[in-house]
Image: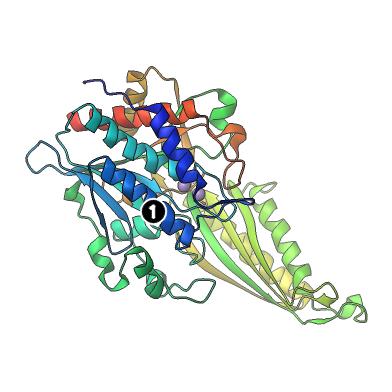
Amino acid sequence: MPAVAINSTRLNDNLTALGQIGNTDEGMQRVAFSSFDVAGRDYVTELMRRAGMTVRIDAAGNIIGRVEGSGPSLPAIAMGSHTDTVPAGGQYDGALGVIAAIEVVQALADAGQTTRHPLEVMVFTNEEGTGFHRWLLGSRAVAGLWEAEDFSAVHDDGATLTSRLPDIGGNISHIAEARRRPDELACYLELHIEQGPTMHRGGYPIGIVTGITGRSVYHVDIVGEANHAGTTPMALRRDAMSAAAQIALKVRSIAGEMEICRVGTVGSMDVHPNAGNVIPGRVQMGVEFRDERMESLAAAEVELRRTAEEVGHAEQVGIAVTAQRNTPSVPISGNMQQLVADAAEVAGLAHITMPSGAGHDAQAIASITPAAMIFVPSVNGVSHAPAEYSTPEDCANGAQVLLNALLLADDR
Ligand code: GLV
Ligand code: MN
Ligand code: MN
């Protein structure tokens, strides 16, 4: 296999430049469909063109860059990730995978090396699902995994997805055209930060992902009675917040002491009318559970519903639990794990195998083509927060392993 080296300075400079787009006092705000998101998309589109790619936007708003290969009508090797962030997020989640994929194509062009397979860099729309509450929106369109709720999705600000997709060049009525046939793709490779503490603690530069976690998401709507906080006796209250607090603690113990599933989180809460001297009449909260075993997620749901019934009865409030999403866990094949292990060995880098506790575009794309994921360490395991950081050296190592894996895949 001919050795080609990525340019670490260029990779890290481009990553820093993208990290300036949407960077605020409260961290990254490059939330999908925002003006920051559009500016970030423009930036990576320009980098793709500079690397010699032809660039198109598909019906889901995904940015797809492509260079042709030397082989006769071979399927493409795809690489990618996302450039949208969570609110108050970090500079590396998604961004690293996109900038590194472009660096791989640029480094090959600089070396005058053409692969046999065509190469595609895919920048997926709304991986995080912020705003429309529909995650992996772009990658699920490519995999043909859109659901009815995607078509009818409405943003927190009231706008429909149908009306917003054209802002980034998409078109919901043509969404089926974003779908790729399995015979168009040879494989998919995604570099990403780990987003947890395992690699940083253990001192491993490269992680080989064995599978991506399953995730179930619920909307819990609690309706009590708003009343005066100073005059209403405790025994006569129908306090939606009191019920919400009990459910939130139960979500923690379902994953904690009860060990029913790996993690459980209440990440959002909307209190009505949200005034210090009014007993909350309504609370809406977002609950999610994650585990690699789908049976564990099902058991967590049973316990959540049982708790809602019990708390609703005790607090005299109405509680509706609505399942919003149930994303299956996805295993990574042994062959694709071996590809990354071989690529790390070519680079002389130690590696660890591990499951991914975060979700990724790769889990959608894995349903149409063999997918692999490469992890690099997150300093102190921080992610989805402004302090998210991976060292320039670790980012460069990851990009080099991505390039090595691509060349090995091109040969196989
Ligand atoms: C996606 O970033 C997730 O929440 O795992
Ligand atoms: Mn994320
Ligand atoms: Mn991500």
Q: What residue lies at 28% left-to-right and 35% top-to-bottom?
A: 106
Q: Position of residue 89 (x, y in %)?
A: 57, 49
Q: Nearer the viewer, residue 206 or 65?
A: 65
Secondary element type, mark 1? helix
Q: Position of residue 165 (x, y in %)?
A: 37, 68
* Crowdedness near tag 1: few (<14), some (14–19) or many (≥20) residues, C-alpha within 10 Å: many
* Number of dots carrying numbers: 1
Q: Is residue 336 left or right of residue 202?
A: left
Q: Is residue 15 left or right of residue 175?
A: right
From this viewpoint, is residue 153 visible? yes
Choose top left, top right, bottom left or bottom right for residue 223.
bottom right
Q: Nearer the viewer, residue 128 or 241?
A: 128
Q: Please, what is the three-letter code of the amino acid marked with disc 1?
A: Arg
From this viewpoint, is residue 412 visible? no
Residue on which disc 1 sits: 41
Question: Considering only vertical position in the picture, is 68 above or below 112?
Answer: below
Question: Considering only vertical position in the picture, is 2 above or below 178?
Answer: above
- Is the CB–ligand 3 distance for label 1 below 8 Å? no
